[in-house]
Image: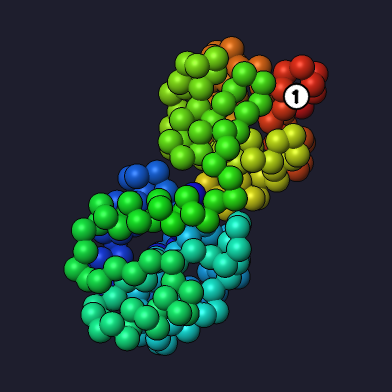
Amino acid sequence: MKLLVIEDHPSLRALLVEHLQHQGFAVDAVMSGQDALAAQRTTQYDAMILDLGLPDMDGLRVLEQRACGHHGPLPCIVLTARDAVESRISSLNAGADDYMLKPFDIRELEARVRAVLRRASRSTATLTCGNLHFEPQSRHACVDGNMLDLSRRETMLLEALLLASPRIVVKEFLEEQLYTSSESVTLNAIEALVSRLRRKLSTSGAQASIHTVRGIGYRLAPVSAHATND
């Protein structure tokens, strides 16, 4: 899952990014409303965390102009020091999915993010390919009931491939979803990640294989499909 954090306070912004990344999210962070709107024009996010007190515009304007995510209007949790009831009502009426007053417990914020994402999800059904099963809520992957030991990015890659299967996922889309805008991505980063996941699937006995579509991207298909790796 990819989040956009809009917070102008440097130390709080850094804390949010560090904690959420540690918990398995990909996170982009900006400090202004204009940067937030620009980020949404170029990147697909699953949810955003929005501070209302931004230096260039009221956060409610960002909320009202937010982009659509995978499942409709981008889910949003508002953060603010404004404790007036009217402010909370204005945020909710503008489309906020949840509201937290500063100061807050970052663990509670994480829990609320996950709750918002669950509500926004089109389906909580298990994703499958052959004997490979992936639970979106727990983010656990299993082969014949045996859990796979996957890194955070391997899990994100597997989910993206399963969601599209048997369609092709282009390499540029994977780079955008698996890495934040502040990270430098080497030319072979995706290839190396795919290679590690492919090896783990093979070792586990998964009846699913990642196929390279040269010059385009990758797709996940059941072994019985007899697709040929390039």
Q: Position of residue 55 (x, y in %)?
A: 35, 85
Asked whether, in this view, residue 204 is left or right of residue 27, the answer is: right
Front residue of 47/122: it is 122
Image vertical order of residue 113 relative to residue 213, above or below: below
Front residue of 187/54: it is 54
| Rendering quarter of residue 11 | bottom left
On-image quarter of the C terminus: top right
| Rendering quarter of residue 168 | top right
Image vertical order of residue 19 relative to residue 83, above or below: above
- Does any portion of residue 62 appear in the rendered image? no
- Does any portion of residue 211 appear in the rendered image? yes
| Rendering quarter of residue 103 | bottom left
Name the residue: 57% across, 67% down: 73
Front residue of 23/77: it is 77
Asked whether, in this view, residue 61 is left or right of residue 130, the answer is: left
Graded by Cα atoms within 10 Å as few (under 14), some (14 to 19) or many (20 or more), the crowding at tag 1 reads few
Q: What element carries label 1?
A: loop
Identify the image's colour scheme: rainbow, by chain, secondary structure or one colour.
Answer: rainbow
Name the residue: 65% across, 50% down: 172
Q: Position of residue 72 (x, y in %)?
A: 60, 63
Q: Residue type at mark 1: give it.
A: Asn
**For mark 1, what is the residue?**
229
Q: Position of residue 4 (x, y in %)?
A: 45, 63
Name the residue: 43% across, 36% down: 138
Image vertical order of residue 82 relative to residue 9, above or below: below
Q: Position of residue 208 (x, y in %)?
A: 66, 22
Name the residue: 35% across, 56% down: 112
